[in-house]
Image (cartoon, rainbow, N blue to C red):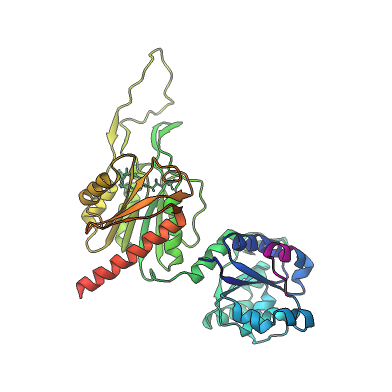
Amino acid sequence: MLKDKKIVLGVTGGIAAYKAVELLRLYVKVGAEVFVVMTRSAQQFVTPLTFQTLSGNPVHTELFDLFQENEIGHISLADRADLFVVAPATANVVGKVASGIADDLLTTTIMATKAPVLFVPAMNVNMWENPLYRQNEEKLKGFGYRFMEPVSGALACGWEGKGKLPDPSAIFEETLALLAPHDLAGETLLVSAGPTREELDPVRYLSNYSSGKMGYAIARAARQRGARVILVTGPTCLQAPCGVEVHQVRGAGQMHQTILAEQGAASILIKAAAVADYRPAVKADDKIKKNAAETMTLVLEKNPDILAELGQLKGGRILVGFAAETSDLVDNARKKLERKNLDLIVANDVSLPDAGFDVDTNIVRLLFKDGRVEELPRMSKDEVANRLLDRIVELKGQKVEGRR
Ligand code: PMT
């Protein structure tokens, strides 16, 4: 989404200025063109050369510098931006823009741009809570400027509390959200992700290789597209996507209970989790000991089929499942679509390299209830997620049309 987009990254004078370097790298990595504007105090913390080297573009610092103004004037910088991100944003810069003061290059370009502007404040907790600052932020929000909340923790000034710059990856995600179509605004998505762990004894479990990447990508993309997202996830090593309500579960039983409790709020349900079909019939209270026998037999009992149950409860809502298959992909997936009363199933041949479990890419076919099949090439899981959401938006539109 950010490829070839022109981002103006405003850096102001706070200790978190060094994190803007990492943010710049994330933008550059996905092909965005970044122009950095630094205030004078920002240059006390990080040198313009660092940003210049990593962005491949001259860094802009002065409003009345003949050379800089000749090369790319500040109005041209404001005009060419698809997006403005100010990170870190000090109380000073927020206060100046809120008061209509444009006395340096950064505030002048912010005032002159028609592009969306995202402020990412970082400051001392008392400054952040100061009614003067709060009023300035609220005023700017009222004019359509976007803000990210600082995170809590130990601040460089010695205080503990809200005021830290969010992780650059979280700012990056928020940037995507700003540019994404908000075609899921008003919808609530329930997404399941990751594996389940079926406990055998206090130290062992049965599970699978699901990393949660596919489900998290869907949750993240849906959030970026304006939806409220409830993510029910088995154990993973992934960071929760920004702004998503996360329910951590372990076994299929817990996933079942949580999904049933949450499903009522959802208008769209997507089950990407790799749920164990069976669990040990008995969970031993103590660690199972090795004995003289050469083999051991485990007795397993069936877990509830959560997706099939949702199929009974779905009413007019959209229900999407995944099918992880190693043979007869389309046939098996279509049977699941019909048996579980789905609108769409993502058929995933998990025997292919670069597809399925624990990789960053996927190769899938989308099978629709009306018989259509859409074959997608190898894509990142983020791209698969967006393609899937595109189709869900279309299905949603068709359902609305059908009711008219
Ligand atoms: O997590 P990643 O590493 O990114 O890997 C992604 C993935 C391979 C896990 C994902 O793309 C995928 O294919 N998920 C579905 C895995 C699976 O359990 O497939 P299945 O064919 O066994 O189940 C069919 C559907 O029924 C799934 O939507 C599953 O969530 C659901 N199910 C299955 C069993 C059960 N007891 N309850 C269920 O709800």
Instruction: Name the spot of residue 189 as percent of width and height, x first.
Output: 36, 61
Where is residue 153 shown, x and y percent of the image?
63, 58
Q: Quadrant of residue 82?
A: bottom right
Q: Nearer the viewer, residue 131 or 194?
A: 194
Q: Can residue 37 be seen in this view?
A: yes
Q: Which of 239 and 160 is in front in this view?
A: 239
The answer to whether one can see residue 247 in this image is no
Image vertical order of residue 256 relative to residue 228, above or below: above
Give the residue furthest to the bottom.
Answer: 100
Question: In which quadrant of the rendered view does residue 254 lie?
Answer: top left
In the image: residue 165, left or right of residue 330: right
The residue stretch that appears in magenta: 50-60
Q: Where is residue 83 in the image (x, y as percent from the top left)?
A: 57, 74
Q: Quadrant of the C terminus?
A: bottom left
Residue pictured at 43% horizontal, 18% vertical:
290
* Residue visible at 35% across and 51% down in the picture: 258
Determine whether, in the image, residue 224 is placed left or right of residue 131.
left
Residue 51 falls within the magenta-colored stretch: yes
Along the viewing direction, whichever of 69 and 45 lies nearer the viewer: 69
x, y percent for residue 350: 38, 42
Outermost top residue? 292
Which residue: 62% across, 62% down? 28
Tally the marks.
0
Quadrant in the picture for residue 328: top left
The relative height of residue 78 versus residue 194 in the rendered view (above or below) is: below
Q: Residue 184: within the magenta?
A: no
Q: In the image, what residue occupies the spot 64% across and 86% down?
A: 99
